[in-house]
Image (cartoon, rainbow, N blue to C red):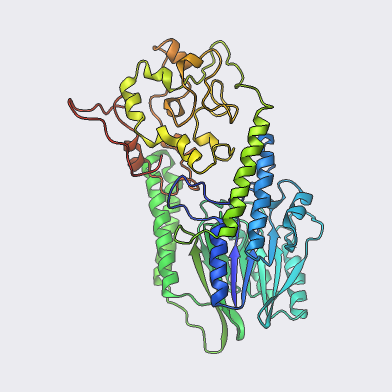
Amino acid sequence: MTLVFAASTAGQLVPCGCSPDQRGGLPRTITYLKALREQAPNVVFVDAGDLLFESASRPPDQLLTQKKLKAQALSQEEMIASVVARVLGPRDLALGAKFAHDSAGPVPLLDAGVAPVQGARASLMVEAGPVMVGLFAAGYEEDPKATIEARAKDLRRRGARLVVMLAIPRGDNTFAQAQALLPAAKAAGVDLVVLGHLDDPATDLDRRDAGSPPLLAVEGHGQSLLRVDVQLGKGALTLAPSPEDKQGDLKLLDARIARFQSQLAAHPERKTQLAAKIDELEKRKAELVAQPLLKPPKGSAFAQASYLPMSEKIAADADGEKVVGQYDESVAELNLKEAKQQPESCPAPGSREPAYVGVGSCTQCHAEAAVFWAQTRHAHAYETLVAVKKQYSLDCISCHVTGWQQPGGVCRIDRTAVGSPGIAKRGVGRQDVQCEACHGPGSLHADDPSVPMRAQVPEQWCRRCHEPANSPRFDDAKYRPFILGPGHGEPLAQGQAPRPRPSGPNG
């Protein structure tokens, strides 16, 4: 049989599209599963938890209706993908038990102990061809050991040939907490454990513990799927890695090491913390290199696990894309309607409170810098939203306009091209990533040039938008030269033409 798992999708319907190599998107998942079912008849697709929302906290009021629409679209996508069950993780319950129940439709919900939900099941038996597979969730209870024992043994009594536990641990470092549950799972006769609740769905990588029972974790936001091909036989199920698995794990470790080394170079003040993480990863890499590939004995029960990146190489399913399109249209209609009920502009700034004045004001004294800025991708950030019909999405707008929800910035999603009252003559709206997005609000400086603005822009300021989910390959040292030019400490040589608009990293 073939088991496929998604985990910690965490409200990510599709990648934002800011970077061409972003992975994820449920329409791609649907395409993969449809193709797999044509090749392998006994396929079971399970959502291991945390589908609906980015966080377990209630969304802000301004975002609430859009988040509800997205959660409903996520549920529709998984129905198209023929999911057999969904685990209720803490991120699924951000709007309470009733919303979690209603959003599931006909999909069975598995109770992991997060909160009581009407109709949620303790366990579920599903068919994988002639074999019955038992599924249950646990880990969030005060005493998960008792839950694991009761649910696993009940599934065995009901005839399950394979028992899979979906782990939803409480608190931080959930992979380590799931490892702590393995002795109880082994004693209860669990064959396989899959982690459903990740600490950070955007950055936590695929991981495995090849113990007994094996523990597997797949990265979140739909960036990858976990595929487990199972061969039933004698004895406890063992994980049989392939050479490709090992090389993939080594590449992932190398990528994490390189990322931390880059952060160490940029943040020497965090040397102790980052160096410890690098040492830990180097140790794991050395252990993996030295570990021989295990060959399961003939006739034994074993599984091979593989991680499947949902990259742009996988075409989006037409039915899945239709759901996304309907969601985008609904969001635009909703947010434009609600915008009309909001104030025309952000709260008026105080007498000496800085406000955003717009690039038109900056141009009066910094014309050369503005000319160069106009050639960068920052100057076309709003166009990228319009191109994909997401200019009215509250998920996207804050990184594509200047001063979102700030005095003198943009407070209505339908007023991005309008300047602020009292200072509108200085600017031409707040669309795009303008000067003040990096250097801060400029009204005081515009009134009195002796008032300084932020001159040095640290990397962490850029990472407010260039965060892993939206800009997976962001490298400050490589990206920054694409936005530096005249007026940024790099004057052009006499007679040298301004640089063309770059076609490299995405702004």
Residue 107 horizontal side relative to residue 499, left or right: right
Q: Nearer the viewer, residue 382 or 406?
A: 382
Check the image and report above or below for 38 versus 419.
below
Return the x and y of residue 484 as percentages of the image width and height.
32, 32
Check the image and report above or below for 356 versus 110.
above
Residue 71 horizontal side relative to residue 147, left or right: left
Residue at the image point whose x is 45% and y is 75% from the top: 242
Residue at the image point whose x is 53% and y is 28% from the top: 416
Q: Nearer the viewer, residue 244 or 22?
A: 22
The quadrant the C terminus occupies is top left
Q: Nearer the viewer, residue 349 or 461?
A: 349
Q: Nearer the viewer, residue 174 or 469?
A: 469
Residue 38 horizontal side relative to residue 170, left or right: left
Quarter-wise, where is residue 362 in the image? top left
The quadrant the N terminus occupies is bottom right
Check the image and report above or below for 133 versus 335.
below
Residue at the extreme bottom of the image, as rendered: 298
Return the x and y of residue 130 as percentages of the image width and height.
67, 83
> Tag count in the figure?
0
Check the image and report above or below for 161 versus 316.
below
Residue at the image point whose x is 40% and y is 68% from the top: 247
Residue at the extreme right of the image, as rendered: 118
Residue 135 horizontal side relative to residue 431, left or right: right
Quarter-wise, where is residue 397 in the image? top right
Return the x and y of residue 418 as percentages of the image width and height.
53, 22
Viewer can see residue 72: yes
Viewer can see residue 211: no
Residue at the image point whose x is 48% and y is 16% from the top: 443
Return the x and y of residue 209 as percentages of the image width and height.
54, 68
